[in-house]
Image (spheres, rainbow, N blue to C red):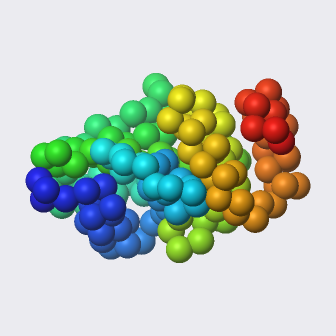
């Protein structure tokens, strides 16, 4: 497993998700690469999955070291998995937007609109570069959906830097 890339790690984690029977999708750079004008390199895999208590045991059985991140008295909002060089984050949808984005995913990949929203929320230079490249690719966008969540997350200033 040491010579594999994040896209190859996906097969391993997908087996775990499917065995447990949770709804899941790819987020982050691998999702953005589906829509970017030119793909970019990444060294990790970001996913989103509905939490099921059996998930942790299944991940550990698959050889992952698992760290659960949760606020006191709350269910997990993030699970970090490591196995050798493999680093996988599993976001757990805890707010309405995340549940909507997960339900809209197609082929276990976030829609282009939801990739853009996630990237605008994160707003790191590489995230904003993902948005720029996606817009350069001239992918068809549901602007009403984008506008709804850009307003809900107060991302108008970030979105406007792209001439939108």
Looking at the figure, which quarter contains the N terminus? Answer: bottom left
Residue 143: quarter of image: bottom right
| Left or right side of 55 for 49 | right
Q: Most extreme residue toward the right, as rendered? A: 144
Tell me what residue is drawn at x 60 percent, y 30 percent.
123
Query: Closer to the camera, 20 or 162?
Result: 162
| Left or right side of 123 for 86 | left
Query: Closer to the camera, 141 or 25?
Result: 141
Q: Is residue 151 above or below residue 9?
A: above
Residue 52 coordinates in the image, percent (x, y): 42, 57
Tell me what residue is drawn at x 79 percent, y 50 percent.
146
Residue 13 appears in view: no
Residue 151 coordinates in the image, percent (x, y): 84, 37
Residue 45 appears in view: yes
Residue 150 coordinates in the image, percent (x, y): 79, 40
Residue 55 coordinates in the image, percent (x, y): 34, 57
Residue 58: quarter of image: bottom left
Looking at the figure, which quarter contains the C terminus? Answer: top right
Number of dots carrying numbers: 0
Residue 112: quarter of image: bottom right
Tell me what residue is drawn at x 17 percent, y 45 percent.
85
Query: Closer to the camera, 2 or 133?
Result: 133
Tell me what residue is drawn at x 42 percent, y 71 percent.
21
Query: Closer to the camera, 22 or 86?
Result: 86
């Amino acid at each position: 497993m040491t010579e594999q890339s994040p896209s190859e790690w996906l097969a391993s984690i997908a087996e775990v998700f499917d065995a447990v029977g949770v709804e899941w999708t790819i987020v982050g750079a691998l999702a953005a690469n589906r829509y970017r004008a030119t793909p970019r390199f990444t060294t990790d895999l970001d996913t989103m999955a509905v939490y099921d208590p059996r998930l942790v045991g299944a991940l550990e059985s698959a050889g992952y070291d698992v760290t659960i991140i949760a606020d006191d008295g709350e269910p997990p909002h993030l699970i970090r998995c490591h196995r050798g060089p493999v680093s996988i984050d599993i976001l757990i949808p805890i707010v309405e937007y995340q549940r909507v984005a997960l339900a809209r995913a197609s082929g276990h990949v976030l829609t282009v609109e939801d990739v853009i929203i996630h990237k605008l929320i994160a707003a790191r230079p590489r995230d904003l570069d993902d948005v720029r490249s996606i817009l350069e690719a001239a992918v068809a966008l549901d602007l009403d959906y984008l506008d709804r969540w850009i307003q809900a997350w107060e991302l108008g200033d970030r979105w406007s830097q792209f001439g939108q």
